[in-house]
Image: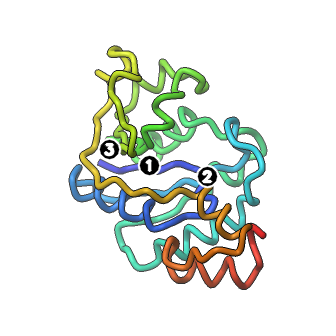
Amino acid sequence: MIGIFGGSFNPPHIGHLILAEEARMSMNLKKVIFVPSGISPHKQEILNAERRLKMVNLAIVSNDFFSVSDFEAKKQTPGYTIETLEYFSKKFKSEEIVFLMGWDCLKEIKTWHRWKDLLENFKLAVFVRNGFNEEEIEKEILKKVQILKNPVINISSSEIRERIKRGYTYRYFVPEKVYYYIEALGLYR
């Protein structure tokens, strides 16, 4: 089984890495492929895809079970999760594909393109956050996903961007190479 970890990764942080490794170990995944979004149908004002791809590559370099794909980043149209998973299903025909996602995304899944197809045709594994409450999700949707028993990591990319903008330290929120990349280019200021 191969995990597909989608998101904006704006920037990628240690929470992403911890959750990906936790999912890899608990689900016995052969690998986790990070797929940074290109044109996001849900998020505005994100750093260009080329820089986010570079940061993800820097973040995962020391883990042989992690890789990054530019499938969504190079698209000229919005990247829809269902299309990404269909692509990886064709690419890895003999492997089951599981989409790794956050609890906050699951709460909004009914706004996603072809969300019913997504639930019917693919395995979804959900990371929990503080405030996780199963009652917020319809039972029919909840039955279709696997809730992961992950450590709760209270770090978010939006918090990191805000800290950078205000001049606060964020050094240990992101992998060291990502920190130096952000600093060298003056990103998120």
> What colouring style does the render use?
rainbow
* Marks 3 and 2 in Cβ contact (< 8 Å): no
| Gap in angstroms between the C-alphas marked 3 and 2 | 28 Å
Q: In which quarter of the image is residue 9?
A: bottom right
- Between 29 and 109, the one nearer to me in the picture: 109
- Between 137 and 41, the one nearer to me in the picture: 137
- Callout 1 amino acid: Ile
Residue 8's tag is: 2
- Callout 2 amino acid: Ser
| Gap in angstroms between the C-alphas marked 3 and 1 | 15 Å
Query: From the viewer's perspective, is residue 120 above or below residue 43?
Result: above
In the drawing, does residue 49 fall left or right of residue 9? Answer: right
Instruction: Name the residue carrying label 3.
Output: 94
Instruction: Name the residue carrying label 1.
Output: 4
- Callout 3 amino acid: Ser
Q: Which of marks 3 and 1 is nearer the N terminus?
A: 1
Q: Please, what secondary structure does the residue beneath circle 3 have?
A: loop
Residue 102: x %, y % from top left: 44, 43
| Residue at image location 54% in from the left, 28% down from the top | 108
